[in-house]
Amino acid sequence: MGTLKEAVDAHPKVDAETLAAKIIKDLSEAELVRLVADEIVHLRRQQTRAIEAEAFRSMRPGFKAGRKPATFDREGFRSLFGGTFRLGDTVEVAWERATVEQHQQRVAMLVKMRDGLNESIALHESVISALKAAGASCLAELDEGKAAA
């Protein structure tokens, strides 16, 4: 088996539990360990986001997204200690040891992710507009010509 993503991509209409059972059945022990390790990385990313969100909340109102804090909030930043963030799939960086360059790399990654989210939002907004304009409840109705004229 390749990656979990490849398995999911190869079977887009198979429900999650059935696909999981098939994947587990077909995996060697080493592959299963890799799969679980990847999920652990994913869960740690979620933990990091939670730590970052809490630190952000604790530093308000002095800190707002998009601008520098009015003062250095030592305790707010210290709350990040013990947490990590990732630079791509292989490099994990401890908050308290991250260099300026590493923070810049992380910002670049996050900007790319944000831009992707903005594109996805714009796509959904476009679909909403098209559905409303056509009086359709879903894209299938537009495709089938069932929308009100």
Image (cartoon, rainbow, N blue to C red):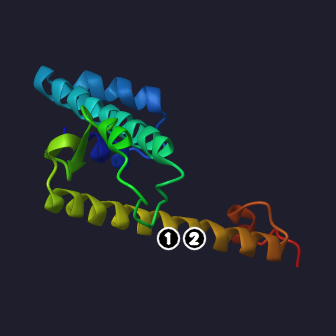
Total marks shown come to 2
Whether residue 70 sits left or right of residue 103 in the image: it is right
Which residue is pictured at 22% across the width and 57% down the height?
Answer: 103
- Please name the amino acid that badge 2 sits on: Leu
Mark seen at residue 140: none
Location of the N terminus by quadrant is: top left
Residue closest to the eye, 109 or 122? 109
Residue 37: percent from the left, percent from the top? 21, 29
Residue 112: percent from the left, percent from the top? 34, 67
Mark seen at residue 119: 1
State the image quarter where residue 113 is shown: bottom left
> Is the residue 13 above or below the residue 102 in the image?
above
Residue 21: percent from the left, percent from the top? 36, 23
State the image quarter where residue 19 is shown: top left
Q: How far apart are marks 2 and 1 (CA)?
A: 6 Å
Residue closest to the eye, 22 or 104? 104
Residue closest to the eye, 90 or 130? 90
Mark seen at residue 123: 2
Q: Is residue 78 visible?
A: yes
Q: Can residue 2 be seen in this view?
A: no
Residue closest to the eye, 68 or 120? 68
For disc 2, the neighbor class at 10 Å (few under 14, some 14 to 19, many from 20) is: few
* SS category of the residue bearing label 2: helix
**Which residue is farthest front?**
71
Kindly check if marks 2 and 1 are in contact, taking CB atoms under 8 A apart as contact: yes
For disc 1, the neighbor class at 10 Å (few under 14, some 14 to 19, many from 20) is: few
* SS category of the residue bearing label 1: helix
- Please name the amino acid that badge 1 sits on: Glu
**Which residue is farthest right?**
148
Location of the C terminus by quadrant is: bottom right
Residue 107: percent from the left, percent from the top? 30, 62
